[in-house]
Image: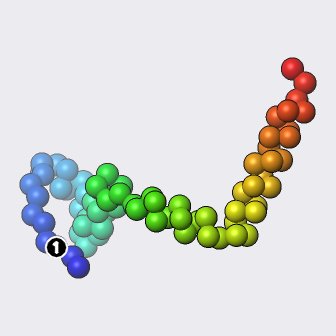
């Protein structure tokens, strides 16, 4: 569901938004900028879903083991 929000900004900023982004695109532009700062993903759910993906887990383990072998084989 969408909610309407009224904000007050400097005239110069408004004109810049209108000119650069476009009259009918300002809301989406502002939302895209603000969203990462106010909407936090449910990381616990996301990590548990990733862990259930067996193929992805096998690939991640293979990558980690290969990387570890590469590091231990380096001559210092």
Q: Closest to the observer: 8 or 50? A: 50
Q: Quadrant of residue 49?
A: bottom right
Q: Residue at x 72, y 57 (%)?
A: 60
Can the viewer see residue 21 in this picture? no
Task: Tell me residue 20's x, y (percent).
Answer: 31, 59
Q: Is residue 32 left or right of residue 3?
A: right
Q: Residue at x 17, y 49 (%)?
A: 12
Q: Residue at x 80, y 43 (%)?
A: 67
Q: Is residue 27 left or right of residue 74?
A: left
Q: Quadrant of residue 25?
A: bottom left
Q: Closest to the observer: 18 or 6? A: 6
What secondary structure is marked by label 1? Answer: loop
Task: Tell me residue 62's x, y (percent).
Answer: 80, 55
Look at mark 1 in the image and give the residue it sits on: 3
In the displayed structure, 34 sits above or below 66; it is: below
Q: Residue at x 39, y 61 (%)?
A: 41
Furthest toward the bottom, the residue is 1
Q: Quadrant of the N terminus?
A: bottom left
In the displayed structure, 70 sits above or below 8; it is: above
């Amino acid at each position: 569901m969408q909610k309407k929000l009224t904000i007050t900004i400097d005239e110069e900023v408004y004109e810049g938004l209108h000119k650069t982004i476009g009259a009918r695109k300002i809301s989406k532009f502002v939302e895209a900028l603000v969203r990462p700062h106010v909407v936090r993903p449910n990381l616990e759910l996301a990590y548990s879903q990733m862990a259930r993906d067996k193929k992805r887990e096998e690939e991640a383990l293979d990558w980690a083991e290969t990387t570890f072998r590469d590091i231990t084989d380096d001559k210092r």
